[in-house]
Structure formats: structure tokens, C-alpha cells
Image (cartoon, rainbow, N blue to C red):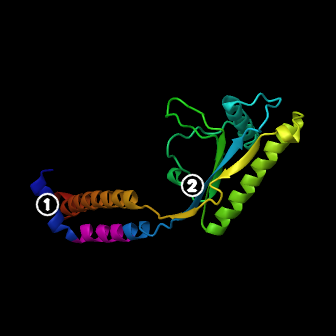
Amino acid sequence: MTAARLIHVIFRRWYVVLAVLVITGLATNAAGRVEGVYSSQLDIVFVAPGKTNSLQISADSLVQFAAVIERRFNGNSEAAALAGETTLYGQGVRSGWSVTLPNSGGQWQTNFNRAALTIEVVDSTPERVRAVTNKLSARIRDLTLSEQAEQGVSAVNRITTLESPATPAVIYIEGRSSRAKIGIIALGVGIALLAAVMIDRLLTRTRSPRGRFR
């Protein structure tokens, strides 16, 4: 079908195009009402004691110890190696949390060089975010102590933890529906044009002598 023919069909079946575009407008408006979420991120940093202990504390061993705690925290499952600025909200999670070993590498190669675990929480209210963050932080501290106690490390020689920042901020992330809107509009326009063409062909055949029942 040529462009001129398509334009002619659109003007002739304008009511079909209008009806579909009205529905598309309603769907686009609904997509624009996506609510945002509250998010917080906290690093639990592992700090070596002032004296060398039985764990042979070094920068690498601190990272290894952090990895051990992460595995115990996550039930010995393989945690996703998220790189760069990947966030839970960026993955579409609107209520949940993660505890991961920071990965400064890329998509194809991991690089774990920080003795810390990153807690990220997203939820619908700041109160829920703070409560979950505090609970996860306390759990990591408990695991840090129990792991060393099981290895017979004396209290004075144990690895300790600190929170960074000391008071994690809870921020509100607005819902982003621009891509959804563009997709809905594009789909709506396509359906409007297709519907106009199909209905025009159907009505044309029905009204033609060959299309009538004998």
C-alpha cells in the first residue's frame, strides 16, 4: 500500500483511528502514574585488628573474609556479581534487598578488591527501608563474630566492622515511565493504522457486488 493510499484510508476511517488513539491515550496516562520507591545503600566495612591474628590479616585476606561472610549470609548460594552502578531499582525491584561483595569489574570480568559488603534496600516507605537495613547490618555483625569465634580467634584479635556512612540516607526515586509511554504510543499508532486498513478492506469487500451473498 502506498503512502497516498494509506492517508486516504486514514481520512476515510478516521473514527477507527480516533477510537484506538483514545484508548492509547488512556493507557499512556495510566503508565505515567508509576509510583517511585525509597532506597538506601550501606557498606559494612571489615577492619583488621591492631595485632596480627591467626587469620593472617592482610588486604587480600580481608576481602576473602568478606566473601566468606557474604556466602554464609546468602545461604552459600552464588550471589550475582553486579558491576558498576547496577541497582535493585534499576533491575525493576520495587520491594527487596541485596547483600553483595562490591564488584569493580565489568560484565565479563569480576574484580573484588574491597573488604566490605554492600547492603541495598528498596521499599515503599522510608521506615521499612531503615528497619530492613538495620536488621541486615546486625545480621552481618553477628556472622562476623560467630565466624571468628568458631575459628578460635580471641576477642582482641578479631576483625571488626563499621558502617559507611554511619547514618545511611534514604532517598526517594521517582518512577520512570518514559520508555513505557513511548512503547505504548508507538504500539497504539501501529494498531490504529492496521485497524483502519483492515476495516476499510472488510467494508469495501462487503459493499462490492462480488462480496454480497447470492
Location of residue 208 by image quarter: bottom left
- Residue 122's quadrant in the figure? bottom right
The total of numbered circles placed on residues is 2
Name the residue nearer the viewer: 185 or 10: 185
Q: Which residue has dot 1 on it?
A: 7
Is 152 on the left-hand or right-hand side of 106? right
* Residue 213 visible in the picture: no
Which residue is drawn at the image coordinates 29% and 68% (left, top)?
21
Q: Toward the viewer: 159 or 21? A: 159
Residue 170 or residue 163, whichever sits in front: 163
Percent position of residue 71, x then y: 73, 38
Q: Amino acid at mark 2?
A: Val
Q: Is residue 19 left or right of residue 48?
A: left
Up-down: is 66 above or below 32?
Answer: above
- Between the residue at mark 2 and the residue at mark 1, the CA separation in whole angstroms equals 43 Å
Asked if residue 144 lies left or right of residue 211, the reply is right
| Residue 152 in magenta stretch | no
Which residue has dot 2 on it? 93
Q: Quadrant of the C terminus?
A: bottom left
Q: Which residues are magenta?
A: 15-26
User: Which residue is farthest left?
Assistant: 4
On residue 68, the disc is none
